[in-house]
Image (cartoon, helix red, strand yellow):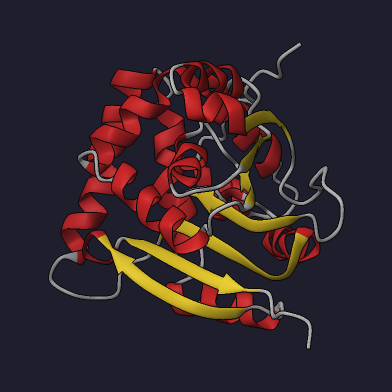
Amino acid sequence: MTAQPTDPPRDPEALFEAEADRAGYVRGMFGSIAGRYDLMNTLMTGGRHHAWRRLAAEALVAPGDRIVDVGCGTGDLSFACVNAGASEVIGLDVAVPMLPIARQKALDRPEATRTTGFGAGDATRLPLPDESVDGWCSAFVVRNIPDLDAAIAEAWRVLKPGGRLANLEITKMKPGPLRPFARFHFTRVVPVMGRLISGHGSAYKYLPVSVDHFDTPEEFTARLTRAGFNVTRARSLMLGTIAMHVAEKPPLN
């Protein structure tokens, strides 16, 4: 039986307080909006999310690589990795209702049908052997993981020496003239849009709160560095609202 979304708290900030079941809420929330997830992504980003995924995939993938896409959702980053030359992509997500949509999309892409597989999986407990993949990637997921350091440790565990990590995430904007407009979009426009289109307005009230509680790009770079990764690229996109990080697990000497 598919897990039903947990009732959201009146204040999304409560999810980030001690004892709040953020993992369960996030799992249920994403499951409940699966049918409108792609449409909402396109509307919120003006369709730019596909270009960002292509950019991340091209920075990550070498021809023939085996890749794990953590929090794969409906599969768009997985397909970008296939297009970039991956020989196999394993898409994993805790929001199980996303997975049939990803599989259906793969049926419309002959090259993806041969090279992708989608299944349930938790970023902090990946069902993969040690040093079994060439690349680990994620798009708009890690800010939702309560134990982010555990997820990064899992990325390190499953990556081969010399393997690469690529991550896309919404991030806090630095102070500047555009920041009030971005805040208005995230805190006022997006929740209304989400309620009208997805029927789950609380999901999109949670979005700006999750961004406020997430690392700055510099903090995420430091987090990866503490875990042992060499950060090779940290790039801001969409006027500083999106961050792309690419990092390497050092090869064996």
Which residue is found at the position 38% from the left and 20% from the top?
198
Residue 108, picture quadrant: top left
Q: Looking at the image, is 178 positioned above or below residue 1?
A: below
Q: Nearer the viewer, residue 194 or 59?
A: 59
In the image: residue 106, left or right of residue 190: right
Q: Looking at the image, is 69 positioned above or below residue 99?
A: below
Toward the left, the furthest residue is: 177
Which residue is found at the position 48% from the left and 22% from the top?
110
Q: Position of residue 9 (x, y in %)?
A: 57, 35
Q: Quadrant of the C terminus?
A: bottom right
Q: Looking at the image, is 146 positioned above or below residue 104?
A: below
Q: Position of residue 68 (x, y in %)?
A: 65, 47
Which residue is found at the position 45% from the left and 72% from the top?
216
Q: Nearer the viewer, residue 7 or 147?
A: 147
Which residue is found at the position 65% from the left and 29% from the top?
118
Residue 169 appearing in the image: no
Q: Position of residue 229 (x, y in %)?
A: 65, 78
Toward the front, the furthest residue is: 64
Q: Position of residue 206 (x, y in %)?
A: 46, 42
